[in-house]
């Protein structure tokens, strides 16, 4: 086994965003691009000598090649042991679990999550720390700093050939364990949930459809839902992962998961529908003809989590990202538990989970999870829902209706303006930010502004301060408007407009969502002048 040191130069733009480094696949395939970044991950986290890492990805185009490069670099950098999913496949939640279970020094995940894959799609690399969670900002800052003055990387000459078979091989002093990607994850799920109750639900005739969107959860869902729990064969659709996700966009929302939406809208729809994304950390939940918004799902899961064995005691607390609707706040208040509001990005939940301050966390962007790992977890959310439905007995649509009757409904939607020029997006945000101090007390589209500010987060555990995390306008009737720029896009800028309107108990909870939100949509246009700055008269994606 021979290793070499390759001279290199800094490559511009290797700054990790909301969730790792995401770029066009073609950018990652440029000579030295991946190698530079991986060397900086090793160097920026204190060196790789003697360490143990988990490595896996969502199977998108370039996954296998990238895993090969990472194994060669790990061997040349003196890594003691790598745990790699067979064929280089591991879902993001599975990586988080393996890091924690085997107490490794961290893990490298190859994915651009819900972004499309393929030669012309996106690719990504994310480092997760020893707690199993996405690297916190101090680590990503240290990695980025290394990318600015890197001069060389180390790599083995030989390409590993053993990752397609479960077993063990070595490269130099590095031991590589190739494992079944599903086994340890399934064991964890069995510890958390009442599998007997869910099996009984299926044997009683309950039907579901899980859309794996040609992405990584296919093998996980098939094994757990169909083989172990007894869901009828065919309950999991699009179950074979493909390098370009079957040409689709593996983002589980009503726009991109249109096949599931059609199935759940048919007259013979199954009782329950769900989907997950490219790397398996997001989820979408549906009942017959009904989309359960991620914010409502978080609120309902918080209200009924006690029906699952792992959450039968009192929850320590709950956390949501700032733009997520305030529906869960109402549940937390009734349960008398704290509710934390964090910036967008799962990494901000890590400290709260590690400190035992929160048990459940969730985001409007289809992420829900708990203290079982340090990532959001798509299949976990599906299993928690199944556990609740099995124990409660009500149908999911009825359960949600009863919830609104008891707590009121937070109508919610997100409008995305994609691939707008970065200059225009920044100008819009700057102009809006400048208006904030004068907004309180004024009215927009007939609604009174009670508060207008830019969200900054003081982490209650390590006291770190994160600023400029979204501009928000609160109205006196409980409605809310939030604007921020996405940190996960790979082309231009994406403006996200988050809209929320609260209708209290006794009000009409069955309005069309966009109609219910019309006054706030109009207020967003008046205050932020979206059409003027972006040249767009409507959003590209409305979820
Ligand atoms: C990532 C983060 C999430 C975040 C989402 C959207 O998800 O892990 O915490 O909510 O991006 O971020 P943005 O609004 O900045 O695009 P994923 O599933 O893409 O890893």
Image (cartoon, helix red, strand yellow):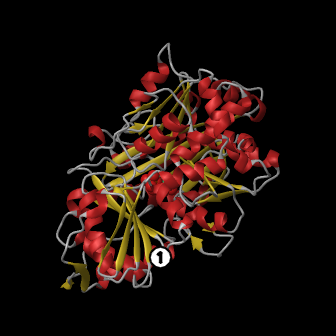
Q: Position of residue 282 (x, y in %)?
A: 49, 47
Question: Residue 187: x and y, percent?
Answer: 57, 52
User: Pointer 1: what residue?
Assistant: 139
Q: Tell me the SS state at disc 1.
A: helix
Q: Is residue 277 visible?
A: yes
Task: Tell me which residue sits at (40%, 77%) in the image.
Answer: 143
**At which x and y percent is residue 244?**
27, 45
From this viewpoint, is residue 484 visible? no
Drawn side of residue 213 relative to residue 360, left or right:
left
Residue 144: image location, x then y, percent: 38, 76
Q: In the image shown, does 205 or 352 lie closer to the viewer?
A: 205
Q: Residue at x 72, y 63 (%)?
A: 357
| Relative height, residue 537 to residue 491 (above, below) | above
Residue at position x 20%, y 84% in the image: 4
Q: Nearer the viewer, residue 181 or 138?
A: 181
Is the residue at mark 1 in contact range of ligand 1, meaning its CB lies under 8 Å from it? no
């Amino acid at each position: 086994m021979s290793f070499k040191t390759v001279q290199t130069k800094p490559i511009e733009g290797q700054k990790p965003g909301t969730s790792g480094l995401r770029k066009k696949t073609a950018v990652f395939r440029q000579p030295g691009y991946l190698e530079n970044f991986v060397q900086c991950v090793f160097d920026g986290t204190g060196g790789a000598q003697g360490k143990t890492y988990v490595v896996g990805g969502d199977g998108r185009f370039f996954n296998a090649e990238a895993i090969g490069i990472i194994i060669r670099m790990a061997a040349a950098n003196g890594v003691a042991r790598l745990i790699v999913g067979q064929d280089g496949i591991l879902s993001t939640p599975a990586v988080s679990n393996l890091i924690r279970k085997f107490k490794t020094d961290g893990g490298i995940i190859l994915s651009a999550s819900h972004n499309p894959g393929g030669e012309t799609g996106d690719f990504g690399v994310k480092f997760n720390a020893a707690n199993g969670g996405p690297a916190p900002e101090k680590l990503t800052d240290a990695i980025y700093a290394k990318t600015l003055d890197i001069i060389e990387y180390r790599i083995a000459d030989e390409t590993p050939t053993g990752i397609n078979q479960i077993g063990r091989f070595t490269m130099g002093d590095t031991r590589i364990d190739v494992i079944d990607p599903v086994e340890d994850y399934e064991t964890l799920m069995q510890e958390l949930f009442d599998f007997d109750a869910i099996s009984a639900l299926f044997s009683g005739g309950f039907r579901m459809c899980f859309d794996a969107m040609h992405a990584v959860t296919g093998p996980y869902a098939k094994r757990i839902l169909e083989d172990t729990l007894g869901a009828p064969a065919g309950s999991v659709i699009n179950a074979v992962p493909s390098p370009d996700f079957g040409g689709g966009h593996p983002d589980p929302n009503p726009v991109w998961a249109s096949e599931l939406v059609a199935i759940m809208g048919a007259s013979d729809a199954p009782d329950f529908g769900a989907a997950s994304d490219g790397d398996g950390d997001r989820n979408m939940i549906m009942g017959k003809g009904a989309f359960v918004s991620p914010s409502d799902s978080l609120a309902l899961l918080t209200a009924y989590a006690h029906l699952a064995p792992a959450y039968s005691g009192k929850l320590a607390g709950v956390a949501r990202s700032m733009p997520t609707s305030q529906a869960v706040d109402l549940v937390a208040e009734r349960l008398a538990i704290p509710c934390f509001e964090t910036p967008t990005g799962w990494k901000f939940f890590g400290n709260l989970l590690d400190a035992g301050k929160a048990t459940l966390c969730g985001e409007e962007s289809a992420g829900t999870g708990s203290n079982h790992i340090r990532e959001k977890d798509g299949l976990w959310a599906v299993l928690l829902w199944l556990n609740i439905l099995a124990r409660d007995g009500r149908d999911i649509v009825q359960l949600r209706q009863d919830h609104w009757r008891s707590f009121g409904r937070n109508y919610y939607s997100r409008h995305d303006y994609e691939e707008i020029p970065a200059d225009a997006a920044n100008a819009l945000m700057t102009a809006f930010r400048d208006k904030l101090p004068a907004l309180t007390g004024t009215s927009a589209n007939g609604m009174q502004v009670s508060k207008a500010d830019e969200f900054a987060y003081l982490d209650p555990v390590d006291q770190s301060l994160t600023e400029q995390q979204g501009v928000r306008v609160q109205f006196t009737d409980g409605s809310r408007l939030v604007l921020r720029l996405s940190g996960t896009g790979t082309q231009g800028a994406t403006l996200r407009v988050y809209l929320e309107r609260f209708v209290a108990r006794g009000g009409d909870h069955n309005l069309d969502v966009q109609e219910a939100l019309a006054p706030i949509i109009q207020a967003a246009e008046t205050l932020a002048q979206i059409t003027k700055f972006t040249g767009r008269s409507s959003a590209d994606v409305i979820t």
